[in-house]
Image: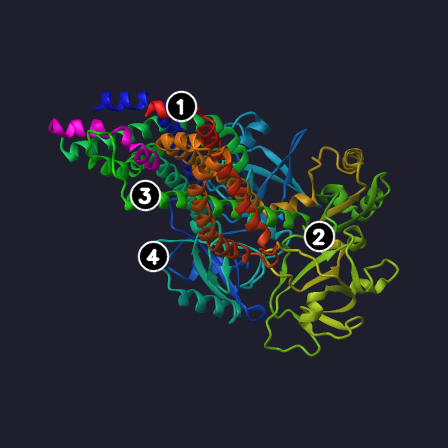
Amino acid sequence: MFKTTWRHLIKDRQFTILNLAGLSTGLACALLIGFWIYDELSIDKFHRKNIYQVMLNENPGGRIATTEGTGSNVGDILLKNLPEVEHTVTTTPAVWFRNFNLSWKENTLSAKGNFVSKDFFSVFSYELLQGDKVLENKSSIVISAQLAKKLFHSVDSAIGKELSWKWQAFDKPCIVSGVFKDFPVNSTMQYDFVLPLEAWYDIVPASNTLTGPFNTYIVSTAGIPGNKITELLHANLNDKITMPFLRPYAEGYLYGRYENGVQAGGRIGYVKLFTVIAIFILLIACINFMNLSTAKASRRIKEISVKKILGAGRFSLVLQFLGESILMSLAALLIALLMVWALLPQFNQLTGKVFVFDPVLLLAVLGITLLTGIVAGSYPAFYLSHLSSLKGAIHRSAGELWARKGLVTFQFTVSVVFIIAVLVVYNQISYVQTKSPGYSKDNILCFELQGRAAEKATTFLAEVKNIPGVLNASSIEQQIILPSYEPSGSVRWEGKNQDARIRFYQMPVNYDLIETLDMQMMKGRPFSRNYTSDTGSVILNETAIKTMDLKDPIGKTISLGSREKRIIGVVKDFHFNSLHEAIRPFIFKLAPQETMLVMVKIKAGQEEATIARISGLWQTFNPGFFFDHRFLDNDYQVQYASEKLVATISRYFAGLAIIISCLGLFGLAAFTAERRRKEIGIRKVLGATVSNLVLMLSKDFMQLVLIAILIAFPLAWWAMTQWLNDFAYHVPLGMSVFIAAGSAIILITLLTVGYQAIRSALANPVNSLKAE
């Protein structure tokens, strides 16, 4: 059977090449998507213990808001009072710290770190290479193997070495008590070192509240009733409104989005999306095989009839044809593996991941390949095996024709949906990138105050402003994107409904921040050094004023916690969260001593020279400190990294799906033209023009494409409406996208079918009639 199959494939080279091209491209797409999905599903799954993260549901403004920010003592309370809890870990939020400066002797470098409680390595499955009870002393530090090699050239020589860590105005000595193996790439936590949480409490004392900025994790082998946790924390932390619950830690990466207190997806949505894309691409490739095999059935009718006369049963014929398709799939797999090997470096760069061939995936790949061969060959096998005619002619039933037309329609329906999806995603990402967030994000340089620059912040900022190329400079507590918020109920004003729980986002800022970011004042004025009373003042955004229902806000007072603040201005609304979310109430409060992130407006075209001058000033204030800087626009774009990745990957795979569909259409058009060769010759002899013949050969395919467009439009409209609804601000889903997609697929079809049609129409009719 293998020899017969091989001879058949070699004999019909056009069929073989078209099917190999389609199947190998489809398998390569599925493999690349499979690598990405496998990696996404493996994130944080390597931890051996049952780790849960404490989450909180609050109810500010009538809708439940879910947060992972807890108070610093939540873990201790759970550990002391619940026997089901074996360990707890509390950490500061990783977003607080861009980088620290670590120094040993004359060697200073920048590294990523965080503050964690002492059971960190007992809870998380990060391997310790050196040290034991590593976080017991608040003057200790545990570093990664890579960092140990950078500092000491060896892991073994790191223990006991005295370092100093520097962050903003804080500079503390520490001793290396342990070395851990570099965190796996599929870990959401990525640190070069960790410090004891007790060292953080020397900077900011611990607070006895349920809500807060910390992350709390627990290990429990037995289930803990939710009401038990709620009652315990409410009783110990004097908070009867905030509702805590536990989320499996490994689910946080994929299931991180909540709507009104209910888990509503997250990155798992993209995993499901690309799974569907991979399946559809493979189906399109299989459909090509089915259509081409049944279309050329007339070439094999004599072979099948002779085998039946010689005693071959239908089952043996089915096995032969399935064997052909499986052999074709295996050959396509070899080509697909070569394609993946060639494309993997670019795919790694595109996705920001590092994929390698995992032996575990080999069986899955082989299984998918065999399944593809069986699916692709099933219909042709059962169809061809029932044929019988020594004359070489077959009667094509209406059912067969409708089946083939249905498959072609399905292919192009999927292709049209892909085109529309790519256009909509592209338009939305372009909208996100070009829409003004309400402040200037271009040419804004950001870096954290550290060392002497933090101690002499006023002097340092004054000198930065004098640097040629600097238009303005100020400082802010942290990046303006994703700021912290005041606990519900901590903001009060005259006339407030006491039952209203409204969350206000807030940010301590320095003088000139609003001017540096080119924000627009709607009423009042920005903070000014000419008014000493501004230290007790605030500026609110438009949404805050509307939420508070203040008709004439300038000069009125509000309470932030226990302090009275006077409103001196109203700033025009700006987007401090991503466009996925509506603008929320926001408060600027003047507190230069609480600011830590410098923001410098640089003159366009002078960025490189100006940054070099700022770096020189930095070294003057902080000799040996690494000048770690970034642009505000980069922080803004990070919010949409997932969408941009989806847009890019979808664009490539949509293009490949269209190419695969066109390969099948090209083959069908060729076989159709060959089957009607005699008819074409007769029509030409009788006076038919080339345009008449091209129209005759193309119209059946065009009808199928038009049907596909009619089916695809409502499907694409529904799917993209659902996707756009995840954004509070998005582009309209106008008809231009559908018209462009429909026009594109019609043009592609005309070019694909038209080539074969024109070629047949231009052929010499005498040769066509002789051949018959």
Cα–Cα span, label 2 and label 4: 50 Å
At x 44%, y 56%, the residue is 247
Q: Secondary structure at mark 3?
A: helix
Whichever of labels 1 and 3 marks the residue nearer the N terminus, that label is 3
Q: Nearer the viewer, mark 3 or mark 4?
A: 3
Q: Position of residue 233 (x, y in %)?
A: 48, 66
Q: Residues within 10 Å of mark 4 (few under 14, many from 20)?
A: few
Specify start and end residues of the magenta stretch as a single range.
290-311
Residue marked by disc 3: 401
**Among the two numbered marks 1 and 4 on one chain, the one whose residue lies closer to the N terminus:** 4
* Looking at the image, residue 75 lies above or below residue 503: above
Residue 145 seen: no
Q: Taking 42 as reference, is 340 above or below it?
A: above
Q: Which residue is mark 1?
A: 766
Query: Is 411 situated left or right of 56 in this image?
Result: left
- Kind of residue sitting beneath label 4: Ala
* Mark 3 burial class by Cα count in 10 Å: few <14, some 14-19, many 20+: few
Q: Label 2's element? A: loop
